[in-house]
Image (cartoon, helix red, strand yellow):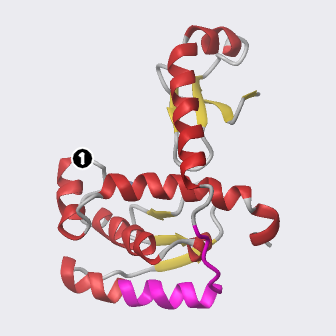
Amino acid sequence: MEVKNFLVIERRVKYPRIELKGMPTLILPYGCRDKAEEIIEKHRNWLEKKIKFVEEIKRKYEKHKVYNRTDDELKKIIKHLLKRYSKILDLSVEKTTFRHMKSKWASCRKNGRLSFNLKMKYLPMHLIRYIVFHEMVHLIVPDHKADFWAYVKKEFKNPEKCEEALYGYWFLCLNNRNSIFQ
Ligand SMILES: [Zn+2]
């Protein structure tokens, strides 16, 4: 089922919610598939606000520059950053993987493994730096509460702007799928 640019899925949640990381997704409680349309109608205003937000971000970033690096160049950059930030954060990164991910730029597993999306090669350098730092801070603070942002802000004064840009770039990369994604 689709609501304009949204993917609609069911998950173990109490109330409908929207996730805007990667593909915008409307998440409905289990057993609501039949009632999906009714729920969407009920939350129409809220949904439209979110849709408008997505559209604005898309428009804002559609002309931004997409970079043309190889996978190896990206890996080299990230490895260098891991070393640099390990010193700043006083930690060591045990395992790192690079792969194509469908819904996020990077992730930090509970076992301390960091995964980076190879699509990061299309991003401007400051966003690559931001993602690497963000994931490394997760090795110290797993969630996104105040402590986490306090760490991030030591290196990135305006993380909100980076998050927004990453969201915009996500669409930019998806939109250019035919030309830049092989
Ligand atoms: Zn995070």
The magenta-colored residue range is 65-81
Residue placed under numbered mark 1 in the picture: 145
* Residue 147, image x, y percentages: 17, 53
Specify the amino acid type for callout 1.
Answer: Lys
Q: Main secondary structure of the magenta part?
A: helix
Which residue: 57% across, 63% down?
A: 64
Between 163 and 144, which is closer to the camera in this rendering? Answer: 163
Can you tell me whether the CB of the residue at mark 1 lies under 8 Å from the nearest atom of ligand 1?
no
Q: Is residue 46 above or below residue 74?
A: above
Which residue: 50% across, 19% down?
A: 46
Which residue: 59% across, 47% down?
A: 58
Lateral position of residue 109 relative to residue 86, left or right: right
Can you say which quadrant of the picture contains the N terminus?
A: top right
Q: Is residue 5 magenta?
A: no
Answer with the quarter of the image where residue 3 lies: top right
Q: Is residue 67 magenta?
A: yes
- Marks counted in the figure total 1
Lateral position of residue 98 relative to residue 7, left or right: left
Answer with the quarter of the image where residue 74 lies: bottom right
Q: Secondary structure at mark 1?
A: loop
Task: Say whether residue 11 is visible.
Answer: no
Between 168 and 138, which is closer to the camera in this rendering? Answer: 168
* Residue 149, image x, y percentages: 23, 55
Q: Is residue 66 above or below residue 61?
A: below
Can you say which quadrant of the picture contains the C terminus?
A: bottom right
Few, some or many residues within 10 Å of mark 1 (<14, 14–19, 20+): few
* Residue 68, image x, y percentages: 65, 81
Which residue: 68% across, 35% down?
A: 7
Task: Say whether residue 175 is visible.
Answer: yes
Lateral position of residue 45 relative to residue 127, left or right: right
Lateral position of residue 133 relative to residue 114, left or right: left
